[in-house]
Amino acid sequence: MFSLFVKGSAPAYRPIGAERSAECALIHAGSFAYPWAEADFEQLLLGQEIVANGAIEADDRALAAFILSRAALDEAEILTIAVAPAWRRYGVGRTLLATHIASLTKLGIRRLFLEVDTQNAAARALYDAAGFRQIGERKAYYRKQGESPASALVMRLDLGGQV
Ligand SMILES: CC(C)(COP(=O)(O)OP(=O)(O)OC[C@H]1O[C@@H](n2cnc3c(N)ncnc32)[C@H](O)[C@@H]1OP(=O)(O)O)[C@@H](O)C(=O)NCCC(=O)NCCS
């Protein structure tokens, strides 16, 4: 049967911990202009309030993508999501986000927030498709190398069917 995954087998979606810090930093550096250090990921991933999921390559068990949220009571905020460049446009980001939302829902999270660069068409399409809606805008929120700062949209998704 036709497979969507021309790049090897489909990854497995699982919770991740601090042992994945170096891989997270590597993928982050390939995804953002201002990368976070391995030590930053280690500190985050050791935090009790952090919920983290990864997409693990079936073949060599390397990390293909990750997502981190910070949870407090029944609310959470997505801190970062990134898919390794070689794995983009295979549906990994969509499945990872859905897996993460399911994990947060199980933990009792009812409202999920995020900020996204208004100029990030890929991420905005991903979040729109997942049902996030805009609730605000922060002007000049993201630094840009050699450009004016970009605004951030603040988005919210209600989990579990009720508010
Ligand atoms: C945004 C990102 C996570 C998407 O991951 P991905 O695995 O490539 O996304 P998917 O293949 O699951 O695509 C899901 C949907 O996202 C949207 N999308 C993804 N890449 C896109 C692109 N380059 N242009 C427009 N829409 C895009 C589409 O709506 C897509 O659905 P479709 O394939 O049915 O059209 C990935 O591009 C990435 O890591 N970017 C760099 C880091 C980043 O910007 N993170 C978000 C910070 S807020």
Image (spheres, rainbow, N blue to C red):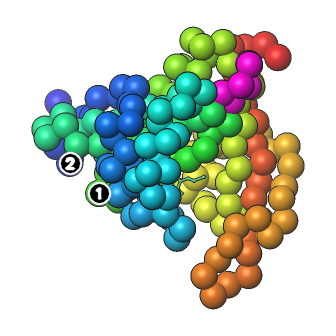
Q: Nearer the viewer, mark 2 or mark 1?
A: 1
Contact between marks 2 and 1 (CB within 8 A): the answer is yes
Q: Is residue 133 left or right of residue 6?
A: right
Give me the residue at 44% from left, 51% from top.
39
- Give the magenta-colored segment's residue range: 71-76
Main secondary structure along the magenta-highlighted residues: strand
Q: CA distance from mark 2 to mark 1?
A: 8 Å
The single residue placed furthest to the left in the displayed view is 59
Which of the labelled discs sits on residue 86, or is there none? 1
Position in image of residue 3 (x %, y %):
22, 37
Q: Residues within 10 Å of mark 2 (few under 14, many from 20)?
A: few
Q: Is residue 88 visible?
A: no
Q: Secondary structure at mark 1?
A: helix
Give me the residue at 63% from left, 52% from top.
124
Position in image of residue 161 (x %, y %):
72, 14
Position in image of residue 115 (x %, y %):
71, 50
Q: Is residue 124 left or right of residue 45?
A: right
Which amino acid type is marked by label 1? Answer: Ala
> Mark 2 highlights which residue?
7
The first of marks 2 and 1 along the sequence is: 2
Give me the residue at 68% from left, 19% from top.
109
Residue 72 included in the magenta stretch of the image: yes
Q: Secondary structure at mark 2?
A: loop
* Front position in the image: 21 or 53: 21
Q: Residues within 10 Å of mark 1 (few under 14, many from 20)?
A: few
Which amino acid type is marked by label 2? Answer: Lys
